[in-house]
Structures are given as C-alpha cells and as structure tokens.
Amino acid sequence: MWIPSSVFRRKNILLGVSGSIAAFKACNVASSLAKCDAHVRTVLTQSALRFVGPVSFISLTNDVAYTDEDLWNMKLRSLHIELGRWSDVIVVAPATANTLAKIANGIADNLLTSIVLGSDKPLVVVPAMNVRMYENKATQENLSKLRDHGVVVVEPEIGHLADGEVGKGRFPEVEPILFSVAKTLVPQDMAGMRVLVTAGPTREYIDDVRFISNPSSGKMGYALAEACALRGAEVTLLSGPVNLDVPPGVKLLTFESVADLERLMDQTVPSCHAVLMAAAVGDFTTSKVAGKMKRQGNLELTLQATPDVIAKYTQKYPNVFYLAFAAGTDGVVEEAREKLARKQVDAIFANRIDEENTGFGVDTNSGWLINKNTTEEAPLQSKVDLSWWLSERIICQIRAKSETFQS
C-alpha cells in the first residue's frame, strides 16, 4: 500500500455496510483500516445481515458493530447522533442503489441513514450493484446529487458481477477506497498543483535483447507520487520498467531509455508546478546493434555520457520547483550539495546505497534533505513514510514557486 499508516492512526472511521453480495468485501476494508491503527466501528443494515454478520467486523476491528436493533436501545441514547459525532469520516461500502437513494434524498429509516443525515463529517460511498441498476437514470441522478453535496464517490469497477453479467458495478479493490478515505483526513494543501514525478531505472540497449541498467525498484518515486496525490495534487508519474501497482489518483506514463524520459518530460514539464526526480537515470549509453549479438570472443563497448536531464529543465523552466535525488556512499552529502548548486535545483535528497536497509531494491530508506540554507536528516523508515516526510517539508517551497509560476 502506498498510503502511510500514520494518515489513519487514531482516526475514528465509521464503516456502513449495506445489503449487497459485496458486503463480505467490506471485511477487507475494515481489516485494512484497523491494521493502520484506525478506530473502526461498523453499522450493518438489516439487508446486510443476510450476507455478513456483526461478529466478523468485531473480530477484525476489535471494536463495536451495530445493527438497526441498537437504534431503539434506550441504553444507547441518541446513538445515531453520537456515532456521527464520534466519527472523523463515514464510509458506506458497499453502498447499494437503495441506500444511495435514501442518502441522496434525505431519507433516514434505519441506523445507517440516520447517522449520515445527522452528521456533518466527510462521507465516502462505494457503490456496488448490477450494471443496469448502476446505469439507471435514477441512480446516476442520485450519485450526481451526492457529488454536488460534497460526497466522495469511489467509482465501481468494470468486471464480472455476481449475477453473471459483465459491466460497471463491481466493488473496487481496497486501495482506491483507502485512498479516497485518506484524502478526507489529510490537508489538501497541494490542490490545484500539477506535479511530475519520475521513478524507476532507465535502460540503454546494447542490442535487441541486452541493455545497461540499474537495480532501481521505483518504490521511492511511486510512494512520492501517491503522497502528492493524497495532498490534492494532479500527479503525472513517469516510470521506467518496474513491477509495481500504479498508485490511485495518479496518471502513469512509461519510458525505457534516457531519451524516452526526455521526450516525456518535454511534453509535461512546461505545465508543471513541481518536478520530483526520483528516477535512477543512467549515466551512460552506447550504440545499439541490430538483432542479437552472438557470444564469441571478448566484447568492447564504447560508452557515452547521457545528458544531465534535470539540469536541462532547471535552466529552461526556472519557475518550476525541482527536487533531485542523489545516491552514493562516503561523502554523499557533500556530493549532493555540489549537485544542488550545479544542477540549480531547489532541494536534493541524498541517501547511501552501501547500507543494508537503504537504497535500491529495499522497502526502507534514510538520508538527508538538503536545500540552499538547511540540511535535515531523515531517519530510517519505510519509503512510503519517507515520501510523506518529504512532501511535508517541500510543500512550502513548492507553494512559493507555484505562486511565482501563476503570476
């Protein structure tokens, strides 16, 4: 998951489950949130009980699960109001056509819809139903009304449905649901900004099947792209060849060679407010031989230096904020300070690649964030958490350059 667990830690999340065959998938949502240290309470409608029971959610969240019977329990005074006050965000997953219609039109005839009507907290709904029910004009009008009221709608997926049909209405995977919930919990301080993130390795082909590359996994760049998207930015991710799931809320474009990367950056940098250069761009290329070279004798390659990609754009588009990355061993901080000045970037993150838990191919990293005036050390942590750490520290610089950009 590309979302830092700290986003959900100690947050109060009310999970509403309505009567869809997808109700059992809400267990995964509840479990995922609980594993991120969120406080999760569940409310099941009467029809949801035909598919899944309260005990499942109590076991997964170690917290309370309510049903409509609790609405009339005199020991729980104004339960529908108290649960609305308690929650930081309300998530209805799955949301049937019937429940969506009730919420959109202010009908409160069960515990869940009464909580929603009596709460002013953010609301996230996850529709799941037959494709014709989803596409029905009444359902679409209800969804439009909900969006107009500020409700976050997580779009269902296209796929095989429980009734044997294929179409839009399938309950989505947990990641986009968590992404939408997380966005309601964090400041949208990058809203309106266009951010370009690069990630992964480059490949310079020797022949049609062999290439010069590096072991970059792309994890740092992917996590950084998600951190910016969570904060409300419009994010384009330029990725080299990696085996990673695309973070929700991010537009993905792919490259292989340094030349490919430059072509994509030529198209995207001019309209960006920030460029976060986490890709491990190769320093050398060579002439490519057509076909596949045969193994015979020794082979000599003539290597040519690749262009300094980020330096090209800092000179051409100086109003854009640039964050570079520098990987090295002894003296990496001093080398990074030299690159900061030479490449004319606004900030640079330096990390060691000769330690067990940092650098290429691992899930953790540490290093130093360096700009013209300060150097701050980042402790060892997951790359997901480090990306959030970085986004918190560069937002003011991005905003300052963004204002210059807009003027």
Image (cartoon, rainbow, N blue to C red):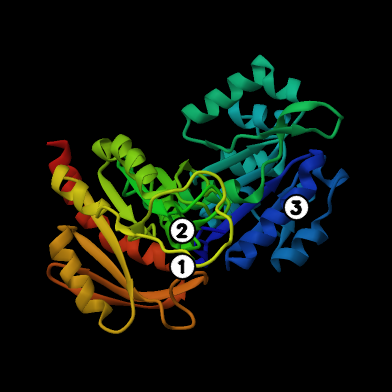
Q: Residues within 10 Å of mark 2 (few under 14, many from 20)?
A: many
Image vertical order of residue 378 relative to residue 151, above or below? below
Residue type, label 2? Ala
Q: Residue furthest top?
A: 137
Cβ–Cβ under 8 Å for marks 1 and 2: yes
Location of residue 267 by image quarter: top left
Q: Quadrant of the N terminus?
A: bottom right
- Identify the secondary structure beneath mark 3: helix
**Residue 48 horizontal side relative to residue 370, left or right:** right
Q: Nearer the viewer, residue 3 or 118?
A: 3
Q: Residue furthest front?
A: 297
Residue under pointer 3: 70
Residue under pointer 1: 383
Cβ–Cβ under 8 Å for marks 3 and 1: no
Residue type, label 3? Asp
Considering only order in the chain, which callout, 2 or 1, is on the residue closer to the N terminus?
2
